Amino acid sequence: MEEDPLLTITDLRIEGRSGELWHPIVKGVNLSLRRGEVLGLIGESGAGKSTLGLAAMGFARDGCRIAGGSIDFDGINLRTAPEAQRRSLRGKRIAYVAQSAAASFNPAHKLIDQYCECPVVHGVMPREQAEADAFELYRRMRLPNPEAIGFRYPHQVSGGQLQRAMTAMAMACRPDLIIFDEPTTALDVTTQIEVLAAIRDIVRQFGTAAIYITHDLAVVAQMADRIKVLLRGHEVEEADTRSMLAAPREAYTKSLWAVRSFARAERPPATGTPVVSVRNVTAGYGAVDVLKDVSFDIHHRRTVAVVGESGSGKSTTARVITGLLPPRKGEVLFNGKVLPPNFKVRSREELRQCQMIYQMADTALNPKLRLRELIGRPAEMYLGLKGKALDSRIRDLLALIELEPDTFIDRLPSELSGGQKQRIGIARALAAEPQLIICDEVTSALDQIVQEGILKLLDRLQAELNLAYMFITHDLATVKSIADEVVVMQRGVVVERGPKAALFAEPKEEYTNLLLSSVPEMDPDWLNRLLAARAGQ
Amino acid sequence: MHGIWTMIRQRLLLGMLTLFIISAVIFGATELLPGDLARELLGQSATEETLAALREQLGLNESAPVRYWNWLTGVLHGDFGMSMATNKPISELVGTRLGNTLFLALYAAALAVPISLTLGVLAALWRNSIFDRASNALALTAISFPEFFVAYILILWLAQSGIFPSMVRMTEATTTLDFLYMAFLPALTLTLVVTAHMMRMTRAAIINLLASPYIEMARLKGMSPMRVVLRHAVPNALAPIINVVALNLAYLITGVVVVEVVFVYPGLGQLMIDAVTNRDIPVVQAIALIFACAYVLLNLLADVLSTITNPRLMHRK
């Protein structure tokens, strides 16, 4: 006999407002969840995943409204129930774990106070009992010092620990359902594993049903019993995890699966004078050395990927090369010539040779300037182009990054999509006609399909223009697809470096191995195997 | 914890430096006033000899830096000099007046701060509602009229009908309660003038935070809108609120001139007006310095309070 589902969503339609108009975000989605079951919701940004997840709590963000359909949670119609009743369910029977725990914990209160709020306000248990319970859940979530960590403020706790504390907080009232909204997206791969394992265990221990929202297929494969794929507010397909992974039916699902298949063959090790040679650089801020004795070379037409966790010194290395942070020891050579350590004393020609592309194209582009000025300025400043010559150069650059010049040349950044903005970032770097481009996490903020487009573009430009890339990233899948050489950094030290294929096949250092093995694979048993293997060591 | 003491020490030193600069500006500004002080005091009929004698007595023959130095060292010893008009020590003259002004400021603050914070929080809670619009419109109306106009309107409505007195007459027999009654209209005028600023800043500071992920989290934990605002938004909005309150408190002390004149209130503002009319320069200088002190001290207090209420500054990693 089939028990009644815990949550049934039928033909749900949600609209968002832009100006005076309402446009659909979720366009008639059905969803059903049994007690204790974990459903994975997957799709790109804008697919309506989070909106749908929030709707399962009877909640719509400001500027959104639930326009049609029904949401039935354990016999309660969340659309027609009075707000007070919905509020009494939230936190108590349906809980939420947000993408960025660092932003979702209130900076003004201690973790334990935020934990106890739900059980106390909802009248589930008194404060003392809630505190004792918190220590128990913190322990189960494998947080260090479970009895002390709650008395810290959010800013005193690391991101991975906060994410686990937030999962514990969601568990406080032992809810029937938890919505996990991209809970590990903001974490490093090595931290992600711990959080994933802790979440999975606690959900199983308490038999909690969960909706797990993510854009990462490999992650959802570890967590979900069933997977639902969303595209622009529509359901594409739904199946249990193993059959979905083994045989996706729809073309869109297949394309998601295939995204990570882009991989360029590694070019043979280059000889001759490297474009950039970082030699024994030690650098830091204040009294702290962030980089210690860092050395590596980048050759013409080669991509060197610098990988490591946040805080490992990747971006600081870029700042040393660009002259923003003069090193304490060591030097940077450009085509065999020593570069002045401070950018202020570098010549315009030296500055021109090395350009940057940033992670957040949104904030890296001046929102008040049109593309003509954004791209035109470096061309004018470094190459002295003016008038017709400048105009035709801007058009060439737009064509180079695959944007139609006539359509785009007078647009503002706000009129572009995320991927198009990043393309403008690339064009702006190219405008100076550099030999080296430093790409700092340039694809991290983009959807996978868009990422692939950017990577292909960068690869094509490298071949055409003979560029050298320094590619800073924490995403090893990106490294696999475009790097020639890899530099692995940990706490300011180069742990290992070498050609990509060799490094991936036979990592020599333990840390490299840890990093590589932590990248989720599209196999539902991957996490189990990995945890078993690590426990066995 | 010792970080906060270091900060207070630094701010105090900085505040003293500010006051030192201000004292120079005040002295310089009064130097620039046209006319001959001795002649102003003695009138047109005075002979050259008597003028010279008075100049000598007042030390006006010294060079400006020397006179500034003498004045400053006097002030540092608590001696503001003698009033030229009344020939009394200024500290004596200012003492009771300062007390009266502080009392009125405190009175107005006791009305204005709770009212504007409550209105601000409620306006944020019920934003874009009738309540929000109405309180905004009223507060803006109040702030848009000049103080003397508000004061006369209040006199017209509340004093003409005999409910409240329009003048503050203090005698030996005046009790605190009488005082509160008599000073109600000036306090209410000041309240009306400062409420809009504090209320709108409170509202804006809270609404600014309502889009934060932790506010959404609180709502998703099933907390009531009131609790979301009071417990989750307000603690994070304290810094801007404290600063705007401090600024307005400073205004209540220094901006009372017009109100004191309208209600014939025996405060510093009145004294300053009289001193300006009488060309009683030392009194003007002393009061200006006291006003500057009020600004510096209240800003220091605001800085310290915003630091104390911010866990990120109080509890390091």
Image (spheres, coloured by chain):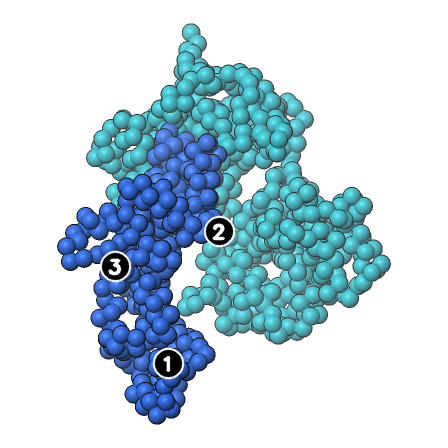
- Kind of residue indicated by mark 3: Asn
Q: Is residue A224 visible?
A: no
Q: Is residue A167 above or below residue B60?
A: above
For chain A, the rendered hue is: cyan
- Kind of residue indicated by mark 1: Gly
Is disc 2 in contact with disc 3, using a CB cutoff of under 8 Å?
A: no
Report the front residue among B36 and A85: B36
For chain B, the rendered hue is: blue
- Name the quadrant containing residue A339: bottom right
- Residue A121 — which label? none
Is disc 3 in contact with disc 1, using a CB cutoff of under 8 Å?
A: no
Q: CA distance from mark 1 to mark 2?
A: 83 Å
Mark 3 and mark 1 lie on one chain; the one further toward the N terminus is: 1
| Residue appearing at x 38%, y 32% in the figure | B225
Report the front residue among B7 and A162: B7
Tell me the chain of label 2. Answer: A
Q: Which residue is mark 3?
A: B100
Q: Which residue is mark 2?
A: A309
- Name the quadrant containing residue A236: top right
- Kind of residue indicated by mark 2: Glu
Please state the horizontal and vertical placement of residue A217, each as a whole percent of the image.
Answer: 55, 33
Question: Seen in the image, is B125 located left or right of residue A324?
Answer: left
Q: Which residue is mark 1?
A: B43
* Dot 3 crowding, Cα within 10 Å, few <14, some 14–19, many 20+: some
Please state the horizontal and vertical placement of residue A382, each as a whole percent of the image.
Answer: 73, 66
| Residue appearing at x 69%, y 70% in the figure | A348
- Mark 1 or mark 2: which is in front? 1
Q: Residue furthest top?
A: A1
Tell me the chain of label 3. Answer: B
| Residue appearing at x 49%, y 67% in the figure | A283
| SS under mark 1 | loop
Tell me the chain of label 1. Answer: B
